[in-house]
Amino acid sequence: MTASASTTGTTGPDLVAPTAPNRLTARELTLAYEDRTVVDGLDLAIPDGEVTVIVGPNACGKSTLLRALGRLLRPRGGAVLLDGTDLARIPTKKIARAVGLLPQTPVAPEAITVADLVSRGRQPHQHWWQQWSGEDERAVTDAMERTDVTALADRPVDELSGGQRQRVWIAMALAQETDLLLLDEPTTYLDISHQVEVLDLVRRLNHERGRTVVAVLHDLNQAARYADQLIAMKAGRIVARGRPGDIVTADLVHEVFGLASVVVPDPVTGSPLVVPGTPWQAEQDEAAQAEQD
Ligand SMILES: Nc1ncnc2c1ncn2[C@@H]1O[C@H](COP(=O)(O)OP(=O)(O)OP(=O)(O)O)[C@@H](O)[C@H]1O
Ligand SMILES: [Mg+2]
């Protein structure tokens, strides 16, 4: 019996609970900086327990949207709702226990060490009567191991390479142990193997721990590979959303990025692989050349 088949009105043990609602939603969301409106009247529901990836050209409003979802930016109009309540009406610490946000360009306090920065992820869980618990210790150790930064624990963050630093920020976000995780370009600065490692980690958090993840990624092919749900944005609007296999086409790539491409199945995963270029153009050029010869 499915949840929607509960027409008999019974509440027997075989009745599957209705699908969980979307914990994080936005209603008629308008986001602006002074006189520049970036997002205007956007409705959005983040699917619980899935990985949602946002893609779109530079300056289309991805980070602005993510910051609003994490209450780092106050909406000009409309609202972001967590479990049906406007974020503006939820205490900051309570939000921070539910939603973790890694911004695009986080700034570390001067001279802070890696271990101290990662430990800050535990602040929302601490109380005045207990500053540091075994649970905090476990979460920090676990987050540092998962991101491969344990060996850097005593190093000052501002002396790390860009990629090392990025992994430390991800560790801090993981240490927060929130059900919802918002990551703005988590793979920036990472070499290809660390990119894959971080994205695999995100996948595992989702599969093994049921975390809901929203990530902004620039690499369309990684987005298509790792997203359950893909959101394509352009000029502050959602142009398309859905399973990558259902929505990634050469037309969409052209509409969103103004780029000619061919979309083929990724040889490893079967997800859409976007290859920039127009093969017919090359063929035409060859034909024209042959005519001349
Ligand atoms: N703090 C700010 N003050 C004023 N304007 C801003 C601010 N932050 C962003 N903007 C503007 O808002 C628009 C959207 O920026 P946003 O950072 O959301 O883009 P993005 O899609 O994340 O781009 P990118 O891919 O380059 O990270 C841009 O025009 C940008 O210049
Ligand atoms: Mg951005």
Image (tube, rainbow, N blue to C red):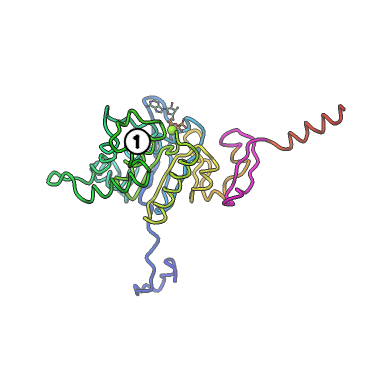
**Magenta includes 260?**
yes
Q: Residue 198 in the image: state x and y as whole percent.
A: 43, 44
Q: How many labels does the image show?
A: 1
Q: Which of 271 and 10 is in front in this view?
A: 271
Q: Which of 150 and 126 is in front in this view?
A: 150
- Say which quarter of the image contains residue 286: top right
Q: Residue 55 in the image: state x and y as whole percent.
A: 50, 39
Q: How crowded is mark 1: few (under 14 residues within 10 Å), some or many (20 or more)?
A: many
Residue farthest to the front? 151
Residue at 39%, 68% (x, y): give it.
16
Q: Give the magenta part as a residue range.
A: 254-277
Q: In which quarter of the image is the N terminus?
A: bottom left
Q: Which of 162 and 44 is in front in this view?
A: 162
Q: Residue 259 in the image: state x and y as whole percent.
A: 61, 34
Residue at 63%, 36% (x, y): give it.
276
In the image, is 227 to the left or to the right of 111? right
The secondary element bearing badge 1 is classed as loop
Q: In which quarter of the image is the C terminus?
A: top right
Residue under numbered circle 1: 75
Q: Residue 140 in the image: state x and y as whole percent.
A: 28, 45
Residue farthest to the top? 35
